[in-house]
Amino acid sequence: MKMKKANQLTAIGMILLVVGGILSLLSFFSESSHESFASHFLYGISFVWTISIGSFFFILLHHLTGAVWSVVFRRIAEMYASFMWWLFALFLVLLLMIFFGNYDLYSWYSHPDALTLKKSAFLNSNFFMLRTVFYFAVWTLASSSYIKNSINQDEHQDEKTLGLTPKMRARSTWLMLLLALTLSFAAFDWFMSIDAHWFSTLFGVYVFAGVVLTSLSAITLAAIWLSKADVDGMGLIRKEHYYSLGALMFAFSCFWAYMWFS
């Protein structure tokens, strides 16, 4: 019964993946939506990115605080964080379409004016792509390392793998700072620079608040679905765990609203 329910979830996911791929191709080849396809593409993959990068933040926070209650959700966060490789590839495809194809998304590149030319040292296609590669290299390598260590601890219960926990906790201190910087600059690059005439120093924090709130919501939904499917390990989740997730979601909802108002 457990396997049957888990297979049903997998089948639903595959169906949604195929339907999404077909709709994306129809949008790509449709003349009516060709001009806005780049913005739709950015919107779609950015939504998945918020879940993935927010889940990586959850992993770092789990190790940094040494929390116990979040252990039951760590596997879900690691699952979402493992999408980073795919997002890396999709973002590169998007940037190649924008900078080498006929897709108008960033006006500072397609229609530069006096103001954007003054910002050309930062807003230019080569440096833009280089920064994006750097962001994803940091996120992908760091998240892959945590996921690999976590799996090793499950498969091999010995002194070597048990010693990985304090190492991951120590590494989380500076990785959390690096994540804050890279996430903020990614928000400036990918979203705020769409309108290079508008800028806000709070925009990076605003996006961060939304990222964490979205990922917490996704982790909660996955936990509920997997628990109902009787997937191994999900039986450990209790009401108190959902209460803790709910408290975090409420806190970041208030934080996100405050940043939006600011």
Image (spheres, grey):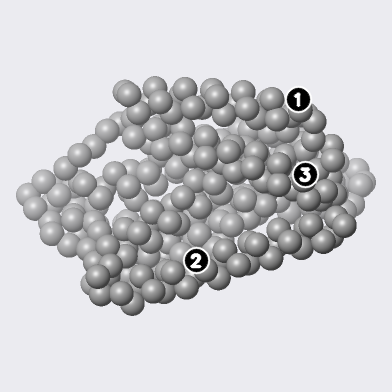
On the rendered image, what quadrant is the N terminus found in?
bottom right
Label 1: few (<14), some or many (≥20) within 10 Å? few
Q: Give the residue at x 12% y 56%.
A: 112
Hey, which residue is sitting farthest bottom in the picture? Answer: 29
Describe residue 195's horizontal placement relative to residue 258 as left or right: left
Q: Earlier in the sequence, mark 2 or mark 3?
A: 2
Describe residue 34's horizontal placement relative to residue 131 as left or right: left
Question: Which is nearer the eye, 99 or 134?
Answer: 99
Label 2: few (<14), some or many (≥20) within 10 Å? few
On the rendered image, what quadrant is the C terminus found in?
top left
Residue holding disc 3: 227
Residue holding disc 2: 20
Q: CA distance from mark 1 to mark 3?
A: 14 Å
Residue holding disc 1: 240
Describe residue 76's horizontal placement relative to residue 195 as left or right: right
Label 3: few (<14), some or many (≥20) within 10 Å? some
Q: Element at badge 2?
A: helix
Q: Earlier in the sequence, mark 1 or mark 3?
A: 3
Q: Which mark is residue 76?
A: none
Q: Element at badge 1?
A: helix
Question: Which is nearer the eye, 200 or 259?
Answer: 259
Describe residue 87's horizontal placement relative to residue 239 as left or right: left
Q: Amino acid at mark 2?
A: Gly
Q: Earlier in the sequence, mark 1 or mark 2?
A: 2
Residue 27 is situated, as x and y percent measured from the top left of the image, at 36, 70
Q: Give the residue at x 68% y 25%.
A: 244
Q: Give the residue at x 18% y 56%.
A: 107
Q: Element at badge 3?
A: helix
Q: Amino acid at mark 3?
A: Ser
